[in-house]
Amino acid sequence: MPERRFIVLGADGRHITLGRAGPPEDAEAAAIVSALHAAGVEAAWLVEMTGNYWGRGRVGLTALRPLMSRGDWPQALDAFEARRCFVKEWGVRVAAV
């Protein structure tokens, strides 16, 4: 069974893992949106990610719902993969959303 986790993905590819047990409750999602808004993020999605983040292949990303909706989902996917490749190559963690 592939690894599964829930992340918040910003339009610029920045992302943060929320956990593996399940998506956040509504109150938790509201707190996330407040934090993102305070950080100046304009677009982000709650995403289910499947696969090995550190593996060679692509991971599966399924948007569960938009958290902030001023962005382009396909562009966010491309930006995520570019950041993920950079992190894997250099062994550094990119700052969270």
Image (cartoon, rainbow, N blue to C red):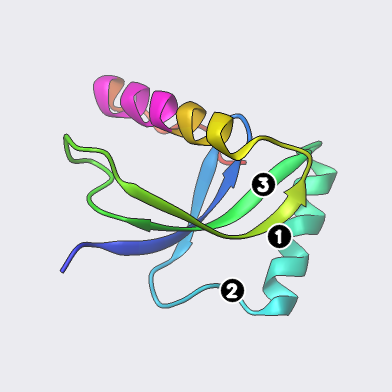
Which percent across, then down, holds residue 97? 62, 41
| Amino acid found under the numbered disc labelled 1 | Ile
| Amino acid found under the numbered disc labelled 3 | Ala
Question: Which corner quadrant holds the N terminus?
Answer: bottom left
Badge 2 marks a residue whose secondary structure is loop
Q: Are marks 2 and 1 in contact (CB under 8 Å)?
A: yes
CA neighbours of label 3 inside 10 A, class few (<14), some (14 to 19), many (20+): many
Q: Nearer the viewer, mark 3 or mark 1?
A: 3
The magenta span reads 81-89
Q: Nearer the viewer, mark 2 or mark 3?
A: 3
Instruction: Classify residue 28 by image quadrant.
Output: bottom right
Image disc number at residue 90: none
Image disc number at residue 44: 3
Which percent across, then down, holds residue 96? 56, 41
Task: Please report whichever mark, 3 or 1, sits nearer to the chain's N-terminal start.
Answer: 1
For image coordinates 57% across by 29% down, the residue present is 75
Q: Which residue is mark 1?
A: 32
Q: Which residue is mark 2?
A: 24
| Amino acid found under the numbered disc labelled 2 | Pro
